[in-house]
Image (tube, rainbow, N blue to C red):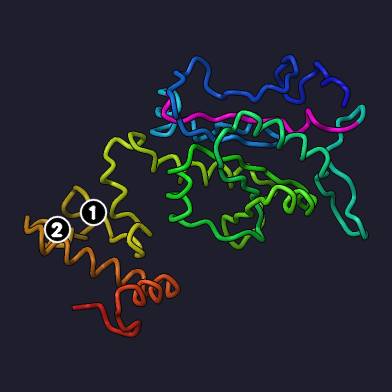
Amino acid sequence: MTSPPSKSHGRKTITATLKPRELVQHQPALKGAWIARIITLFPDAFPGVLGESLTGKALKEGLWRLETTDLRRFGEGKHRNVDDTPSGGGAGMVLRADVLGQAIEHTQKPVKTKQPLIYLSPRGKPFTQAMAQEWSESDGLTMICGRFEGIDERIIDYYDIQEVSLGDFVLTGGEIAAIALIDATVRLIPRVLGNHASIEDESFSHGLLEHPQYTRPSVWNDLPIPEILLSGHHGKIADWRKQQAERLTKERRPDLWRAYCETHNIEPDEDQEQ
């Protein structure tokens, strides 16, 4: 492989390097910090919104780290080509196995423990809260952001890559999905959220969608806050919230409702309104 060009592929002029780019400068290197490693053709897409609010604050404090590997640096030839036409014909282009393989090897070289290697793909297993929880308890993960018609299947087989989907729709690339999945995972890391108890009753945390939320003013456009929430009776409030969560889950996510009923020995057609 020839040495990387000194010309950048973005608006900024930088010296090309194969060293993964840390996206927050001068961040403290906390021992054991969770690390997200991203292989992408668009490293400038990161950290994006991950650099804002609580995730951004935690990133600056070193509670987690974010590194990108520019796939273009491993491209072939004068133009650093990373893709080629599909074998057997067809529209679009496919990311090459040799190029992507070099990028994976380089990115995972410092990884000392078994960590998830993820390819963001519309044909992948649907992303869930349970998956985010599992990832947050690891030391970190590596995500591959696809483009065009996807990546050579041999890469997936050789590295035993886990394909994960954000939903039943198609994006132009994996970068937006990567940001969403990282956000969902990082917020579960201890100390990232100011009040860790705030995630305990969220949607999917107990197999149900979250109950409705209200705050001041007590009446808005002739719509009052439900009286039970202003009663100060915590037991009744908890019961009301559970009933509402069950009602919303039953109405909006029959699949989740059936799974919840099976786990809790509830008849799926049982009316939860009291």
Q: Is residue 207 left or right of residue 227?
A: right
Q: Is residue 195 magenta?
A: no
x and y, in percent, of residue 254 in the image: 42, 75
Q: Is residue 72 magenta?
A: yes
- Please, what is the three-letter code of the amino acid marked with disc 2? Leu
Residue at figure coordinates x 72%, y 35% from the top left = 105
Q: Is residue 225 left or right of residue 269?
A: left
Mark 2 vs 1, N-terminal side = 1
Q: Is residue 14 above or below residue 99?
A: above
Residue at figure coordinates x 46%, y 20% from the top left = 29
Q: Is residue 126 above or below residue 116?
A: below
Foreground of the two, 95 or 110 = 110
Q: Is residue 242 left or right of residue 110?
A: left
Q: Is residue 98 above or below residue 242?
A: above
**Residue beneath label 2, please?**
229
x and y, in percent, of residue 13 in the image: 73, 15
x and y, in percent, of residue 7 in the image: 80, 18
- Please, what is the three-letter code of the amino acid marked with disc 1? Tyr
Quadrant of the frame with the N terminus: top right
**Residue beneath label 1, please?**
214
Circle 1: element type:
loop
Contact between marks 2 and 1 (CB within 8 A): the answer is yes
Quadrant of the frame with the C terminus: bottom left
- The circle drawn on residue 222 is none
Q: Which residues are magenta?
A: 62-76
